[in-house]
Amino acid sequence: MTVQRIGRFLAGAALAALLAGCGDSAQKQVLETDANGFQCEACKAKFYTDADTFANHCPQCKQPQVQQVVGFVCPADQHVTVAPRSRGSVRCEKCGKPVSGLCIPKAKDLQAWGAARKTAAEVGSP
Ligand SMILES: [Zn+2]
Ligand SMILES: [Zn+2]
């Protein structure tokens, strides 16, 4: 996603509200996002790539069932829980409360989650 497109996205108040609470300011957080996080559904491998790379397959088992992950923000302690976007209800991994906000995890969030950095070649990105 280009910076220009992100800027247009931020014009929408709905997304801005959705992203509020993840980091200093929603806009800063999005513009500084430097990675894409993924989890493999087949072998549960956690990994991340550069922001402009999207995984086509798992770097470990080579299966195509990779889920992009997002950050879920806890309303109580602002802890960011990283999980696949498709998961239904997510609870804070720190305090167990249901999370309310969504944010884009950065490389450091993904590292804390246990993801390993992979190159475009390793994840089958063209
Ligand atoms: Zn895998
Ligand atoms: Zn919490």
Image (tube, helix red, strand yellow):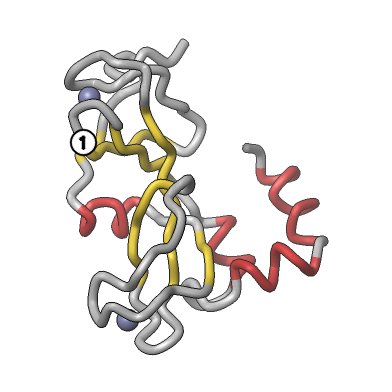
Asked whether, in this view, residue 11 is left or right of residue 63, the answer is: right
Q: Badge 1 local density, few (<14 within 10 Å), some, or many (20+)?
A: some
Residue that appears at 30% across and 24% down: 119
From the top left corner, tell me how far across and down residue 67 is, in percent: 40, 35
Query: How many marks do you count on the picture?
Result: 1
Q: Vertical placement of 5 versus 72: above or below?
A: above
In the picture, which quadrant includes the N terminus? top right
**Quadrant of the image occupied by residue 18:** bottom right
**Quadrant of the image occupied by residue 14:** bottom right
Amino acid type at image mark 1: Lys
Secondary structure type for disc 1: loop
**Closer to the camera in the image, 98 or 35:** 98
Residue that appears at 60% across and 67% down: 19
**Closer to the camera in the image, 27 or 101:** 101
Residue that appears at 46% across and 28% down: 53
Q: Vertical placement of 114 versus 102: above or below?
A: above
From the top left corner, tell me how far across and down residue 11 is, in percent: 82, 61
Q: Vertical placement of 61 versus 33: above or below?
A: above
Asked whether, in this view, residue 11 is left or right of residue 84, the answer is: right
* Residue at the disc numbered 1: 44
From the top left corner, tell me how far across and down residue 88 is, in percent: 46, 55
The answer as to whether callout 1 falls within 8 Å of ligand 1 is: yes
Q: Residue furthest bottom?
A: 76
**Quadrant of the image occupied by residue 112:** bottom left
Residue that appears at 43% across and 65% down: 72
Q: Quadrant of ligand 1?
A: top left
Q: Vertical placement of 62 versus 41: above or below?
A: above
From the top left corner, tell me how far across and down residue 39 is, in percent: 31, 37
